[in-house]
Amino acid sequence: MQRFSSVILLFLVVTALAQSDFEALLELKKGIEKDPSGKVLDSWDSKSLASDGCPRNWFGITCNEGHVTAITLNGLGLVGNFSFPVIVGLKLLRNLSISSNQLTGTISNIGSIRSLQFLDLSVNAFHGVIPSGIANLKDLVLLNLSSNSFDGTFPSGFSNLKRLKYLDLRSNLSGSLDLGLGTSHFISSIQYLNISQNLLVGELFAHDGMPYFDSLEVLDASNNQLVGTIPSFNFIVSLRILRLGSNRLSGSLPEALLQESSMILSELDLSLNQLEGSLPYRIGHCAVIDLSNNLLSGDLSRIQGWGNYVEVIELSSNSLTGTLPDKTSEFLRLTAFKVCNNSLQGVLPSILATYPELKVVDLSLNRLNGSLLPSFFMSTKLTDLNLSGNNFTGSIPLQDIKNLPSVSSAGNLSLLTLDLSHNSLTGNLPPEIAKFHNLEILNLSDNKLEGSIPDGLPNELKGFNVSLNNFSGAIPNNLRGFPDSSFHPGNSLLKFGSFPLSPKGSSDLNLKPHRSQIKPVTRIVLIVGLVGGAAIIALVCVMIYYRNNWRETRSEGSKRNVGKETVCQGDYSLSHTSVPYRSKDTSSSSFSFRQELLSSSKKSSAFDHGNSSFILNDPKYLGHLESTRRDEGLASPMSILSSSNASPSKAEFPFESSSALKVRSPDKLAGDLHLFDGSLALTADELSRAPAEVIGRSCHGTLYKATLDSGNILAIKWLKEGIAKGKKEFAREVKKLGYIKHPNLVSLQGYYWGPKEHEKLIISNYVNARCLAFYLQETEPRKLPPLSLDERLRVAIDVARCLSYLHNERAIPHGNLKSTNILLETPNLTARLTDYSLHRILTSAGTAEQVLNAGALGYRPPEFASSSKPCPSLKSDVYAFGVILMELLTGKSSGEIVSGSTGMVDLTDWVRLLASENRADDCFDPMILERDNMEQTHRTLDAMLQVALRCILPAQERPDMKSVYEDLSVIVLQKGKQKGF
């Protein structure tokens, strides 16, 4: 009887437990608002119970002995709130996998489900902090919290998870990288660690922590803000995949990582860092190696010993030299070989075209010469060939294609992209080009090719350009849909059908004269009427122009005595001493790029040479003139700022609405559009159709934001008439600028050269960011918190790194460095420089005006005052950087006049004076607050100030930018692992 009672009692307990699991799931169901598949809401029926009280045939629910052990609802598109407090009662739950839904909520109670072994909440919308209670899940083997909206950094207690093998925390976190590595058990068990696409700062790992990763197979810490050197990885013998790209790592490649005895590492991505030194002689058994966009140098020939296991070699955008090795016969598995944007010389070795699996070759933007390899064009594997931007000569060797053994072999030619542009190729374009039936992109522009364009090119071509050649004859029918920029400039004898192309690229089909059927009297009446009407319209336009000019003159006179005026464009605002400001009439709903430029040219001309003369003669006002004409809240078209919904209110900045006009351009741009790479697909016709927003005007011209049909947004700088060099020199220089790429630079994408003097555009990507001046000079009430000291130091390092690259790798100065030309791109305020090296495309008068404006704003070095023709230099960049560093430290504008003990002085003199009197603390921005360690803050400020003071020394005593960058990096190291860095 007692035994029977015990059985009954046990049954009741089990039933009660099952009932609680059942009720918890029903409560969980209430939070699901949408179930596109219906699998959950339809099957989770309260009447569907097994005999033990556990849910029966409920989708995604697994039971064992009356208890829920697994909830698996991955990829169902569920929408709603997932209540973790509800499932805390599932005491035997081992697997909770609800990835790839749209579930929300916090996970504060997750640590109470101590039976969990597999927890996958990835790709949802969970928020809040990751609770420290997660350390209670000591049986956890897999933890995936990636792609949610969690806040903060790593929770403490990870070291308690001694069985954890898989940890994925990507796209969530910020702050310092600290996994609590004090206990080796956690480190020794982990096999997969993904912390990529976060906002993590500091060093990768403490070097003494690395030996404990003896089971680590995959480490992905890419797309963060990690600094320092790469650990040696000496004791990680099982590492297969290492991804550290898109960080700020420096130093050289660790030798142990790629030693010849390494037979495990198969993928290495260290791209987009600041790594230096030479290429390794050996890479073990590594199959994929990406070292692109670093500062690596030395001879490329080192790769000839990289062995027979490598499949992908990506070394683009470094400073590699030498010739392509001709003894790399072991590359039997190589599929992609990319070494573009380096300084390679010599000819193409014949062995390069013999690798049996080669599909992608990109050797563009080097200094290679000689002839092309015929075997490249015989390959049935090669899909992408880019040899543009070199010095290749001779013909395009396609004749051997006709000697292929069979028609089927010719049909197997797999080339999709062929770019041979910007070389010196000669001869005819062989008709065998039509054999490439799969071809999608063909770029042969800027060569010396002649003859006719062959028929038979595939109708599927998506990109085609043969401009700047000497082709003649008729354009094949299937190519006539491409824009004029595909054929011109150059090719003056090219015909559209039977007729030569008109200068605008459209065919003039009305060449044959027709006898007029209009009577002479009627013709005379029509002519007189047209002439009279045109005269009346011209007279009205002249009257309107002079009336508006008279009104503006009166308005300017009334404003001259106003004390302060706020000028705003986009998200950037500055307070300026009053200068004449012309707000544009926004009533016009539509006008073209060309119409707007004609209007703006007249206005700027009147402004420059008319009523502004009193300002030009007074140096005190030069800075404010530049700020109004040039900046108007904007540095350049590359620094066009974020949309109006994120901008300060119109009440705060009264001129905002009048300074941004949304327009549509119906006119067809009839000039030459040149793009620097294949990342942007654009025609002149599409650009002319693009709705454009006039953002402001500068000493260079007019600034636009243009939205393409595809939705892409471009920044357009329409250069002012008379400041650009001649076409040939302009094209050569602007292409050089377009080839410059750096993570802290807003690169140029292309340019447009129109048939008229004032039709010159510079094109770049739109950057949704505010400039540094906005952050430093925003007044109360603030839209953004003031920059912290760590953020200011980080900005300074970003700018110094970019300038060091321009100076040392490209040997060119920026030339127009100022706080309005430094964009801070969110979320991590990465600094990106705009308006770089534009003096190279300007006339001497345009350069002189740029230098004059820089001086008015306080960025011009003193040695320019004694030069008859000052020109931007490396040393002048260093001086301007020193001024920007002072702006970061003081929060003041470079052109601001400060009250000092000896009277009114400019910013540099004021800072220099306080430093000489040991009162440097008085110049620091009071907004810089780090109460947790004031001593550390003052040490950092003093160190940054010393760098700034060295930068504004006389030219012969100034350091170079590489030294400045290194000095600032040392400050970071001295700060150690302070919070937020």
Image (spheres, grey):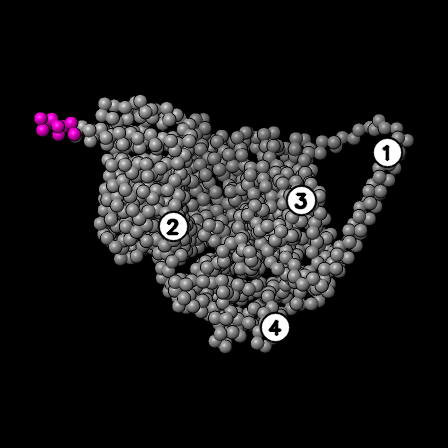
Residue 2, magenta (yes or no): yes
- Above or below for 551 versus 892: above
Give residue 526's mark: 1
Mark 2 sits on what residue? 152
User: Which quadrant does the N terminus fall into?
Assistant: top left
Mark with earlier residue (3, 2)? 2
Mark 3 sits on what residue? 593
Q: Nearer the viewer, mark 4 or mark 2?
A: 2
Mark with earlier residue (3, 1)? 1
Residue 792 on image: x %, y %: 47, 60
Mark with earlier residue (1, 2)? 2
* Residue at position x 74%, y 58% in the image: 556
Q: Amino acid at mark 4?
A: Met
Callout 3 secondary element: helix
The magenta span reads 1-9
Residue 823 on image: x %, y %: 52, 54
Q: Amino acid at mark 2?
A: Gly
Could you give the CA–CA distance between mark 4 and mark 2, rounded to whole angstroms? 46 Å
Q: Amino acid at mark 3?
A: Phe
